[in-house]
Amino acid sequence: MSGHRVHQVQALQQYQVDSWTILPFETQHDAPTPLGYLIANKDGSRLLFATDTYYIHNRFDKLNFILIECNYCKDILYQNIEAGLIPAGMKDRLLQSHFELENVKRFLQANVSVETRKIILLHLSETNSNTERMVREITELTGIETVVAEPGEIELDLFPF
């Protein structure tokens, strides 16, 4: 793909969009060259965005906002397979392509800091997740306001008034 508005991004090659510095980083997924993004504004705010991944090798400092996939709960997935609601063959793909709740919690333990203001969960499975449980467990673990992304806008105030 080419054109004057096309900018091909590569892991660890940062670029600018207006006042934003964007640093793509590698994530783990079953697709070619999956990326997450560390987005920093000149005002000092830092946002992490990662979806369609089951693991992120990197660690990040001073994140204000974390928008992260939390696709499924392993126990619910196994219950759904046992009940015949999910084909058993889907299990291996899910384990190697999407962030499971316990793995998300480990990632957050390593990356949440006193600067973190909000965690937004993305890409939840319709059948293998439990929204209330995910929000509750992550909030209890981190002490940070945690919400699930819904259609529309999410307020990301660095300094609430």
Image (cartoon, rainbow, N blue to C red):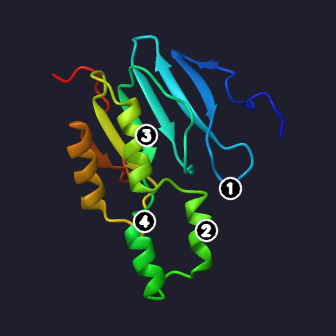
Of the two numbered discs 1 and 2 on the same chain, state the one appearing first in sequence: 1
Q: In this image, 76 relative to 8: left or right?
A: left
- Residue density around tag 1, few if under 14, some if 14–19, many if 20 or more, within 10 Å: some
Q: Residue at x 38, y 20 (%)?
A: 62
Q: Residue at x 35, y 36 (%)?
A: 109
- Residue tagged by mark 2? 92
Residue type at the position of mark 4: Lys
- Residue tagged by mark 1? 30
Residue type at the position of mark 1: Asp
What is the spatial separation of the Cα atoms under label 2 and label 4, in whole angstroms?
A: 12 Å
User: Can you give x and y, in whole percent of width and height, for residue 53 in the image?
Assistant: 57, 49
Dividing the picture into quarters, in which one does residue 37 lie? top right
Q: In this image, 144 relative to 15: left or right?
A: left
Nearest to viewer (mark 1 / mark 2): 2
Residue type at the position of mark 3: Phe
What is the spatial separation of the Cα atoms under label 1 and label 2, in whole angstroms?
A: 11 Å
User: Can you give x and y, in whole percent of width and height, for residue 101 in the image?
Assistant: 39, 55
Mark 2 secondary-structure assignment: helix
User: Can you give x and y, in whole percent of width and height, for residue 82 in the image?
Assistant: 45, 85
- Residue tagged by mark 3? 107
